[in-house]
Amino acid sequence: MTNHMIGKVLQARYQIVQSLGAGVFGQTYIAVDIDYPENPKCVVKQLKVNSSQPSYLDTLRLRFLTETETLKRLGCHNQIPELIACFEEHERFYLVQEFIEGHSLTAELPIKTHWEAIWSESAVVEFLQDVLEILEFVHSQGVIHCDVKPENIVRRASDGKLVLIDFGSIQAIDFGIDVESPIYRVPVTSLGYIPPEQFIGQTRPNSDIYALGMIAIQALTGLSPLQLQVDSYTNEIIWRFENTPVSDYLAAILSQMIRYDYQERLQSATQVLHILKQMVWETQLPVKIIGTQDRPSLKAGDEHKKNLAKNHASSSPPLLTGMRVGLLTNSVLMGLGAYSLMNHVQVPVGTEALYKATEEYQTGDLQEAIALAKSIPAQSNIYPEAQATIDEWQQDWKLAAQTYQLVEKAFQEKKWADVFRLSAQVPDILYWQTKTEKIVDQARSNIEGQGQELLTQAFNKAADKDFSRALEHLRKVPVESSASTIAQEKLVEYKDKQYIRATYFLQKAYNQAFVGNFDSAIKFLHEIPENTPAYSQAQVKLAEYTEKQQQSQGQNVALSKAISASKKNNLQIRHTLTSHVESLNAVDDLQEVNIQSH
């Protein structure tokens, strides 16, 4: 039915050369891009269309556009095919994706129980870590793959890396419409890898974890999922037998990955990765740990194990150990217990004691933990590990206590940055990390209060147009405070306003100086803040206007003296004239007397 597509050219560019089969998404083909001389291969997927009704096509078109946007984001990952193009042609929807040259994981998995092809435990762990890292990214984008199976995992020929393909069945994590997967709609190759909840429309991110666990079990047993039996009472899959080459630790993890009830299953790719890393570290499996930088493969040797412990402690976020104790100790121990009941496999002597000791150590009773670890008999296969663990516990406990004291001191001195920095250095001991977290929480609370108070003070000063003081308050807002974001925004705003205001004062000073009012000009110049571009010019003008002010004052004094002297001269002249007139009058009187006497 698909032969009519062979040779067809889509978008005048992609020529179909081979059919790859049909799936839930629709039909898949290999095509060549004839726009390029070398005609590179690509994968073309045709979306299944069940109706030509306009309303149906509009709905499908919207969903197509939404999912292609998701595929674009996913394609940014190095181990996911890149989305090259998406288009609609003749009411058919097409995706063009990168073609991955290589072979599917199906070619590497053992068939039935040919033990020479069974994977080693380290190979399984490395495979799990590789694919979990991809799923961690996929789930972080808000989608679930929904069809993780061997044929959708390709070993890339160019570099040997695993690539997760065929995202045609992806669903949004909160997708609530049309998500059921009835048996008749599921490809035969997907059966056995799809978890129970996916058939009833309750798909979860850990549905992909289930599928990945089933592939790992197939690698260890040589049995496909449909060949495994199911416990009629618990609905759990029975997969481990006496001759299955797998440790109790990894067996328990795998069993937690494929639990029938998704609520009891390991919840996320990140969670499984943490546990696997812990297992590798504790058991010293020769497996490269994904997510570390230039960390060597694990080898035997106490010195190397101590170095790894230090690296692990420094890179782990606060309270990660709490998750490990709650999940690793309890879940793995429960898994071992459940496994013992189901398959009649006995837990090695001393394992429970060491786990119990670990629990005591993590919850704060170091002496009881050491006593339990020392109670493990010398003939136990984990006796050497227990002895090494005791030494590590004592060293880490001492370091944790010292670091905690430094955190307390930093808190008392209100050195919030040191509180956060030091808290991250507390070793992975739940007891000490819980105590430290309380101080960190209090520090955060204090920082929030301090940040909000400084922000309020800054706002008040800005309202008074005192931007210099406002900026001082904003610069004191702790970067760890939630107010820091607002403070950074207001710093930019208030600097601009301070600049505008300084420029305004400078112009006002110019205007006052122009009319000879140097006193007012100088007052405006004094208002210009030191940390503004106008400040240097203001200082130049301040010196100039001060000098002119002094000159003006000197001229006024001289003028005043001149006026005063002039007034004095006028008085003297008036006095002289008056005396002269009086003298003349006296002569006249005398003459008058003389005339009369004659």
Image: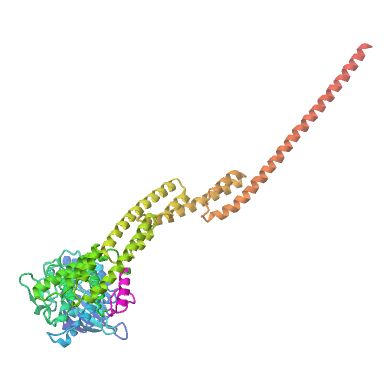
- 422 and 500: which one is in front? 422
Q: Position of residue 310 (x, y in %)?
A: 32, 71
Q: Using the image, determine if residue 361 lies above or below residue 483.
A: below
Residue nearest the observer in this picture, 266 or 252 = 252
Q: Position of residue 288 (x, y in %)?
A: 28, 78
Give the camera-side residue of 257 and 49.
257
Q: Can you give x and y, in whole percent of width and height, for residue 393 in the image?
A: 28, 69
Q: Magenta segment: does it hold 302?
A: yes
Q: Is residue 205 left or right of residue 419?
A: left
The quarter of the picture where the C terminus appears is top right
Confirm whether residue 65 shows in the render: no
The residue that appears at 32% across and 62% down in the rendered structure is: 401
187 shown above or below 361: below
Residue lying furthest right = 598
Bounds of the magenta span? 288-313
145 on left or right of 484:
left
Q: Is residue 414 above or below residue 567?
A: below
- The magenta stretch spans residue 59: no
Which quadrant holds residue 298?
Answer: bottom left
Which image quarter: residue 422? Answer: bottom left
Viewer-proximal residue among 441 and 228: 441
